[in-house]
Image (cartoon, coloured by chain):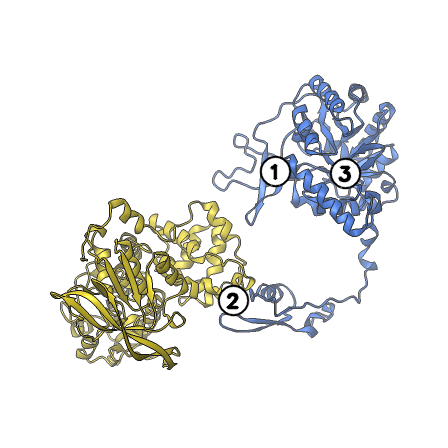
Amino acid sequence: MANLSADFLGIKSPNPFWLASAPPTDKKINVLRAFEAGWGGVVWKTLGSQVKNVSSRYSAVDFNGGRVMGFNNIELISDRPLAINLKEIEECIRLFPDRAMIVSLMADNNKESWHELIKQVEATGAHGLELNFGCPHGMTERGMGAAVGQDPEIARMVVEWVMEKATIPVITKLTPNVHSVVPTGKAVVEAGTDALSLINTIQSVTGIDLDTLVPNPNVAGKSVYGGYCGPAVKPIALKMLTTISQNPVTSKVPISGIGGVSNWKDAAEFLLLGASNVQVCTAAMKYGFRIVEDLCEGLSNWMDEKGFATLNDFIGKSVPNITHWEDLDINYHIVANINQDKCIHCGLCYIACEDTSHQSINLNYGNPYNTYTIKEEECNKEKVLNT
Amino acid sequence: MAIINHRLTAEQYEQNFSDIHPPFETHNAALVDANRCLFCYDAPCTKSCPTSINIPKFIKQITTDNIKGSAHTIFSSNIFGGGCSKVCPVEKLCEGACVYNLMEEEAIPIAKLQRYSTEKAIAQKWKLFERKPSIGKKVAIVGAGPAGLSCAHVLSREGIDVTVYEKESKGGGLMTYGIAAYKVTPQFCEEEVNYITSLGGIDIKYNQALGEQVTLDELRQNYDAVYLGFGVGLARQLEIPGENMEGVVDALQFIYNIRSKQYKEIPVGDKVAVIGLGMTAIDAATQAKRLGAKEVTIVYRRTEAEKPCTDVELDIAKLDGCNLLWLASPKEVIGKEGKVSQLVCSVMSLGEPDASGRRSPIDTGNTLTLEVDMVIKAAGQIPFEQLVTTHQINNNKGRVTIDSNCATNMEGVFAGGDCVNGGKEVVDAVQAGKDGAAAILEYLATNNTN
């Protein structure tokens, strides 16, 4: 059995699966259930000045019968009183001392507010802080969340304030709603953050009700941009993670990977691209905390098969395999192959190649089954010639 | 032993004749199967449909919540798409060709999905087709079955004024009168006919039989063209002694009664022999059982390997508890006081393949005797040979002869469907009607006589 235990900035957890700052981590009852189910740690839902949420605040994108390919929310930070949150955090730490307890923070935009909040949270015994510089809705209008993360200099300033006060490890969470996550990442690393986490949600409009013509989620006839997450955002998150892993400045600190992690394979991919652990939310919101069982078992089996004894044996292993386009081998060719024994004659290869690619598949009409064969010389042709 | 009705309770009749292939109960249930469809290119299912319904397209349209578009796609190719979804032997057509079969997976339930879209359209009376303004041309159609009405619909859409002459009091032909009630109800058939004619421009005159209430000469005089789609209808006789005894009935007549009367009114024997193993034989045997017959035996002169019905159909009969007697050919019906009491059969063996490619049955000289009180003959239907011959229509043993343009030997008279092919599936007749309509449109365009 592979060893799944994780050490993130000295914060130990029995596995690399943390629940991200979100509804599943906003109160004791949820967090205790998560720990009972086996989650390695949680990032407690963002604390700050108490807010009030709208009740209609979620929407989803389905795809070809699959439910919740992507998920969207317009929820703000914790809407529960700070004192209750702090008390419950303390209790959760006491009941599950072997699990990681990180607390997400978004103070009002001045040094005193940050220092006061940090002081109160550290008093709970929490193991680390995560700075929410990513929330794309609701808080940005107040100069917080993504409004901080989108401006490297503001982010740098806030991290400097935090680092003056914090005595426990600080993770800065980056917003993806920028042309590149690297500038803010660099700024906050230079300002002293101990680690980075990414990505937060991506601004989105998930769809429009074609009867009412109101976009989702419908809040009394109006909607706003929400934060998009779930399986649909994973490829974007992996790309952004890679840019952080490959930058000489940002790669110096550990990274907590976030964005559409739904199963152990997703988690392995984040780790291969340089994350030291992963945070999960949407999958847990869809299926419940029980998914952690297969996250652990699947990752462990894969590690055994690959001969990886610990997480560190493969963290970052795929980072060097993503290079610049001009460094690719221009003479590397692949040619399509159709195994006639397995072909079911659906014709999808043919029509895709014929309509949208290079007309490299022969069609021999049959009744009812056509036969498809590859024109190897066409498929192999250097397409730059545009013949 | 006796042939009697009222054998079962109302609940038993209800249960025995309820829908054998229930529809999807919810939209989500339809979506699960619709989403499995791979959306094949030049799809084998479409190529295996005699009317070439664009199946991947109509299934895709279910997944996009475009049920109207889905129904339109189906009806554009097959105006009887609703009925066909219930009666087509899809296991040897679209579903039999589904590529999932090649993966050893369940085929897409195409018929059930087709039913999903078409039933909605028919129930909600969606107006999916617009008739062009009348162009002042008139066409007479003989027979309001699948061939005739499919032809009528295409013609009317093009602005032709169509009059259909139907010998029965309802339209739909064998769909209405010749198919097991647990597959399609007479009520649905009526709704389907009404839906087809709701296009306008199609006037069905009922109780008008060709050669009786109306003559071909009149039709040729009064219309710009005539389409013959009067089907087949006469049951093939066994030509054996005792065939006319009380208790010997034609399968088509038996099924006709089930469809035009209440189930409890239909008499059935205790021990029934059904002769033949086509679709009609199965429909007769299973329904005899479902009406309360104690024992039903299907008598077939060849073996299971040569059977004309599909495996799915045979399974229905087996599951209904019908017995199967292979390699037995009726030789004589024996009776007491003019009523059937026994069926004597020649025991057959298989010889060389015949014209159909199936091994032919040869009489071994031995016989066996079944104790029965009812014999249902389902040995095939024969064309209206006399009707065709008296009208001097070129024919082959009663089957109307047509050329590649669906035209008969008589100027302006076209034909298609069972009266031409001798009896095929409903879906084949629908395509024949479309072909006939196309030929008539071309004829009218080039022969601007009126």
The reply, left or right, for residue B382 in relation to residue A89 is left
Residue B339, given in percent of the width and then of the height, sits at 15, 64
Determine whether the residue tagged by mark 2 lies in a helix, strand or loop. Answer: loop
Picture layout, residue B388 above or below residue A276: below
Residue A44, given in percent of the width and then of the height, sits at 72, 28
Determine whether the residue tagged by mark 1 lies in a helix, strand or loop. Answer: helix
The answer for how far apart the CA atoms under marks 2 and 3 are is: 49 Å
Q: Are marks 3 and 1 in contact (CB under 8 Å)?
A: no
Please give the letter of the chain rendered in blue: A
The answer for how far apart the CA atoms under marks 2 and 1 are is: 38 Å
Q: Chain of mark 2?
A: B
- Quadrant of the image containing the C terminus of chain B: bottom left
| Type of amino acid at the residue the image marks with label 2 | Asp
Give the residue pinned by disc 3. A16
Give the residue pinned by disc 2. B42
| Type of amino acid at the residue the image marks with label 3 | Pro
Residue at 56% across / 42% down in the picture? Answer: A207
Mark 2 and mark 3 on one chain: no
Q: Is residue B288 visible?
A: yes
Give the residue pinned by disc 1. A286
